[in-house]
Image: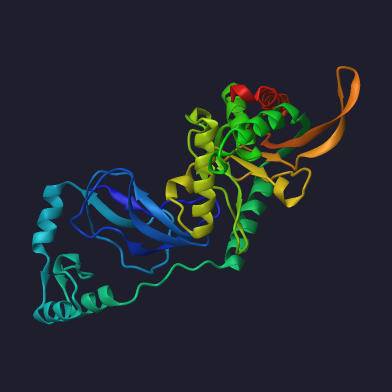
Amino acid sequence: MPDFTMPALGADMETGKVVEWRVKPGDTIRSGDVVAVVETHKGAIDVECFLDGVISDLVPLGVDLPVGAVLARVGGPEVTRTAVERARISPAARSRALELGLPLDSLHSANANGIVTLADVESAAAPRPKASFDPALMRQAIAAAMGRSKREIPHYYLSSTVDFGAAQAWLDDWNLAHEPIDRLLPAVLLLKATAVALTKVPQLNGFYENGAYKPASAIHLGWAVALRGGGLVAPAIHDADHKTLPELMGALRDLVQRARAGGLRSSELSDPTITVTSLGDRGAESVLGVIYPPQVAIVGFGRVVQRPWVVDAQVVQRPIVTVSLAADHRVSDGHVGGQLLAAIDSALQRPDGL
């Protein structure tokens, strides 16, 4: 019978605890269903199960478990039906459950003999611990992950100054022609330009694991989101290269809202193939990021600023953005990194093709 295990929701996660089950023993689940809420230092995360079958043997709530620990079993209907049929409830437990208004089929036994006891009923009726967010704990986890990154990954850094004039003019025209709800942010163009560039320079889209580079099969951009209570998460925008700019804007808006409200899914935290960070709205003109393992690169964008720029042999004022790259020297070198920055620049000069 396959195991549903505690997922690794990033390199900085060591343990987590289930604070809510969205299913009960005997429920049929499909791959991608959200079956539990797991609390980590990043807050409460909706966790999907990528198995088909009937779920059983759910672990108790509120227990700290390491990454990889078994949370439940998923088997065929015939296996779990037998387990459910074996489950019995003691008279005292039945009476108490009816008194509390708990459906009998929602109860499960914590005992090896499968008998639901009074203690099981009281546990089911007890208030569930609410997922908490501890900024200090998140800061410790970030420090540990970034310290590991700087110790183990030989970073190299590149940056390029890009003329954002064509992109800004296109963006202004788009926003003028659309209602506020359909308008785009500059970040969307930066994200799509990065995704398009990675289709041309795929060597930086993947993971370094077990001493070797593994290219990713899709482009899932991790977008760094600053949380209101402090700390940072970088959930994935899946298949960013295939999204239109309006679709990307919708995905970005939804992701940021759910990240700050504590509504992220486990798949969004476990599978970004590269991280993109922008400190432009914070006033920084450039940013040099730290690679989030096992990824092999991080792209950074600074604030768009007005600077003198030579156009057709004349010095004019243009909106300029600094694009930076931190990459893993075990996987690539400056030549490849320079190609990625050049591809981002090229994409931004043709915004109507994004």
Q: Residue 104, position in %: x, y?
A: 14, 69
Q: Is residue 206 in view from this perspective?
A: yes
Q: Please determine whether, in this image, residue 234 is positioned above or below residue 65.
A: above
Q: How is the image coloured?
A: rainbow
Quarter of the image holding residue 245? Answer: top right
Q: Residue 65, position in %: x, y?
A: 41, 62
The front one of 33 and 186 is: 186
Quarter of the image holding residue 124? Answer: bottom left
User: Residue at the location (20% across, 79% down)?
Assistant: 100
Q: Is residue 157 in view from this perspective?
A: no
The front one of 107 and 244 is: 244
Numbered circles on residues, count: 0
In the rendered structure, the answer to whether residue 301 lies left or right of residue 264 reads right
In the rendered structure, the answer to whether residue 26 lies left or right of residue 205 reads left
The front one of 307 and 290 is: 307
User: Residue at the location (61% across, 31% down)?
Assistant: 174
Q: Residue 336, position in %: x, y?
A: 68, 25
* Quarter placement of the C terminus: top right
Q: Residue 297, position in %: x, y?
A: 64, 37
User: Residue at the location (16% across, 69% down)?
Assistant: 103
Quarter of the image holding residue 58? Answer: bottom left
Q: Please determine whether, in this image, residue 58 is positioned above or below residue 281.
A: below
The front one of 31 and 181 is: 181
User: Residue at the location (62% across, 59% down)?
Assistant: 231
